[in-house]
Image (spheres, rainbow, N blue to C red):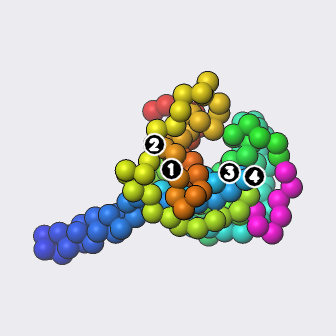
């Protein structure tokens, strides 16, 4: 590949990342709206049979086969210390790319993609740091809806093995 082709490919990739900057996929856990930057989202799939794996933290439901790749599945409700609830037709799995692997996040339902400009983001308040607040990067009020933006690095930090 020539340098010119490499430069063009890099430019296209950077433009694609710029297009996703400030854009979040929003989803519900109970009545709360959370968001994850589109940059991390690889796919959205319907809930499917999950194979339990012994010895994992309580919020790991197990593993699934996602298009030929085995991915661990985390129930976001449980990670946030909320009650488990039965999955229904609106429950889905957000497949995220983080730390060179794919992880599925079970959420109550997906809402929409929104743009949250940096000036609309506020730091989460320090209110004793409940579980879900430790994972927040910002809070925004968009169209009268409060959106709690998840910091994926913090969200998965306790699940990564040290190198």
Count residues near mark 3 (Cα–Cα under 10 Å), then give few for <14, some for 14-19, many for 20+.
Answer: few
Q: Which of marks 1 and 2 is nearer the N terminus?
A: 2
Residue in the image at 20% along x and 73% along y: 8
Q: Mark 3 highlights which residue? A: 32
Count residues near mark 1 (Cα–Cα under 10 Å), then give few for <14, some for 14-19, many for 20+.
Answer: many
Report if residue 153 is visible in the image. Answer: no
Quadrant of the rendering where the N terminus is positioned: bottom left
Would you say 77 lies left or right of 155 here? right
User: Is there CB contact under 8 Å for labels 1 and 2?
Assistant: yes
What is the CA distance from the residue labelled 3 to the residue labelled 1?
12 Å
Element type at mark 3: strand
Q: Mark 2 highlights which residue? A: 122
Q: Which of marks 3 and 1 is nearer the N terminus?
A: 3
Count residues near mark 4 (Cα–Cα under 10 Å), then give few for <14, some for 14-19, many for 20+.
Answer: few
Above or below: residue 61 compared with residue 134: below
Q: Where is residue 108 in the image (x, y as percent from the top left)?
A: 74, 58
Residue placed most toward the observer, 138 or 95: 138
Task: State which quadrant residue 160 falls in.
Answer: top right
Q: Mark 4 highlights which residue? A: 30
Magenta residues, start to end: 85-91
Count residues near mark 2 (Cα–Cα under 10 Å), then give few for <14, some for 14-19, many for 20+.
Answer: some
Residue in the image at 23% along x and 69% along y: 11
Q: Where is residue 39 in the image (x, y as percent from the top left)?
A: 44, 59
User: Is there CB contact under 8 Å for labels 4 and 3?
Assistant: yes
Above or below: residue 41 compared with residue 136: below
Q: Mark 1 highlights which residue? A: 140
Task: State which quadrant residue 130 falls in.
Answer: top right
Residue lying at the far front of the rendered structure = 144
């Amino acid at each position: 590949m020539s340098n010119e082709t490499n430069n063009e490919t890099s430019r296209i990739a950077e433009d694609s990342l710029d297009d996703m900057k400030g854009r979040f996929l929003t989803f519900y856990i109970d009545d709360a709206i959370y968001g994850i930057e589109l940059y991390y989202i690889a796919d959205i799939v319907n809930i499917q049979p999950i194979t339990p794996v012994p010895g994992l933290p309580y919020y790991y439901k197990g593993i699934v086969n996602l298009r030929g790749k085995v991915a661990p599945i985390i129930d976001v409700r449980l990670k946030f210390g909320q009650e488990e609830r039965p999955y229904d037709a609106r429950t889905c799995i957000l497949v995220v790319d983080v730390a060179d692997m794919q992880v599925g996040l079970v959420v109550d339902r997906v809402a929409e993609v929104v743009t949250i400009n940096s000036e609309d983001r506020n730091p989460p308040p320090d209110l004793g740091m409940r579980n879900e607040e430790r994972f927040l990067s910002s809070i925004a009020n968009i169209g009268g809806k409060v959106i709690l933006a998840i910091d994926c690095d913090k969200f998965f930090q306790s699940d990564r093995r040290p190198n």
